[in-house]
């Protein structure tokens, strides 16, 4: 039975890439043929044709119609999901334990039910933006400043910190907070306002890699570009200290066991 979904996020580029590989092409419309049989009852046509028709008039006659219909992203998703479920259902998880974690393999597509949160850096930037807007409105009304100079500089600093353009790190957490799922989501493919993306939803995703126990990753590591610069051994040793990590307030460490996934769609 087909599921009815309300999409919160749908990566159209990934969707088209996968559809093209499955069907050999991408299409945005298709032709549908419809045929029905009408009968005259008491001199009145029971069925009224809605397309151009052909056929022989009489007591019984056939109505045939052809129409062009748009293939929406949601319809493409249904085609993709049907293909993924062709041999067996896509595996669905509301929690992950050790056995499930070890059974999951790279490149596999799975569904999870979890609650998303954005990275701490994004949350800090959003808070800074909201405070700046509020302070501006308040000052405009009262003529008084609500934020002192020190805090104003701190807010400006948070506002200037930007992660990779348009890519928002998101962590999906199960109810038991174990085995977090890290997804890097493209902002342009959200189907709802980001402020609405904060409650339990189903995520269809492709496994990119595992973060094993004892390993960790840092979301929005703002000094990664500096660390990738070629330097000598002494310079690289100096990078090991804390000054090249995110400030404590926005340091967002995900520790294994965890999963990094490619998000395809999120829906309710």
Image (cartoon, grey):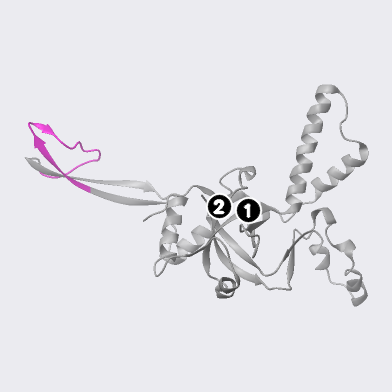
Residue 139: quadrant of the picture: top right
Disc 1 crowd, CA 10 A, few/some/many (<14, 14-19, 20+) = many
Point 61% across, 53% down: residue: 115
Q: Is residue 103 above or below residue 59?
A: below
Judged from this view, the residue extending furthest toward the bottom is 233
Give 50 or 104, whichever is nearer the viewer.
104
Residue 86: quadrant of the picture: bottom left
The numbered dot on residue 201 is 2
Give 111 or 220, whichever is nearer the viewer.
111
Mark-to-mark CA distance, 1 and 2:
8 Å
Residue that mark 1 sits on: 116
Point 19% across, 46% down: residue: 36
**Left or right, residue 67 beside residue 164:** left
Give 14 or 82, whichever is nearer the viewer.
82
Mark 2 falls on what kind of element?
Answer: strand
Name the spot of residue 128 as percent of width and height, x first: 79, 42
First of labels 1, 2 by sequence position: 1
Residue 99: quadrant of the picture: bottom right
Q: Which residues are magenta?
A: 35-56
Q: Is residue 258 above or below residue 31?
A: below
Q: Is residue 42 magenta?
A: yes
Circles 1 and 2, Cβ within 8 Å, touching? The answer is: yes
Name the spot of residue 32 as percent of width and height, x first: 30, 50
**Left or right, residue 117 beside residue 57:** right
Name the spot of residue 132 as percent of width and height, x first: 80, 37
């Amino acid at each position: 039975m087909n599921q009815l979904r309300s999409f919160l996020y749908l990566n159209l580029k990934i969707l088209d890439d996968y559809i093209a590989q499955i069907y050999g092409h991408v299409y945005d419309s298709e032709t549908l043929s419809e045929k029905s049989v009408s009968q005259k009852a008491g001199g009145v046509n029971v069925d009224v044709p809605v397309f151009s028709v052909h056929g022989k008039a009489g007591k019984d006659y056939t109505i045939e119609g052809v129409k062009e219909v748009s293939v929406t992203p949601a319809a493409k998703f249904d085609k993709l999901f049907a293909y993924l479920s062709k041999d067996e259902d896509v595996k669905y998880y509301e929690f992950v334990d050790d056995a499930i974690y070890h059974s999951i393999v790279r490149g596999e597509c799975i569904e999870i039910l979890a609650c998303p949160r954005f990275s701490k850096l994004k949350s800090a930037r959003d808070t800074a933006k909201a405070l700046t807007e509020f302070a501006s409105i308040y000052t405009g009304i009262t003529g008084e400043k609500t934020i002192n100079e020190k805090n104003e500089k701190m807010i400006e600093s948070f506002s200037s910190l930007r992660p990779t353009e348009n890519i928002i790190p998101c962590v999906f957490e199960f109810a038991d907070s174990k085995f977090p799922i890290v997804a890097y989501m493209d902002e342009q493919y959200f189907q709802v306002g980001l402020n609405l993306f904060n409650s339990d939803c189903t995520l269809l995703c492709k496994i990119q890699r595992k973060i094993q126990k004892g390993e960790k990753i840092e979301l929005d590591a703002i000094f990664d570009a500096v660390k990738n610069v070629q330097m000598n051994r002494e310079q690289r040793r100096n990078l090991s200290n804390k000054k090249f990590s995110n400030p404590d307030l926005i340091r967002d460490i995900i520790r294994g066991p965890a999963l990094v996934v490619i998000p395809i769609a999120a829906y309710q």
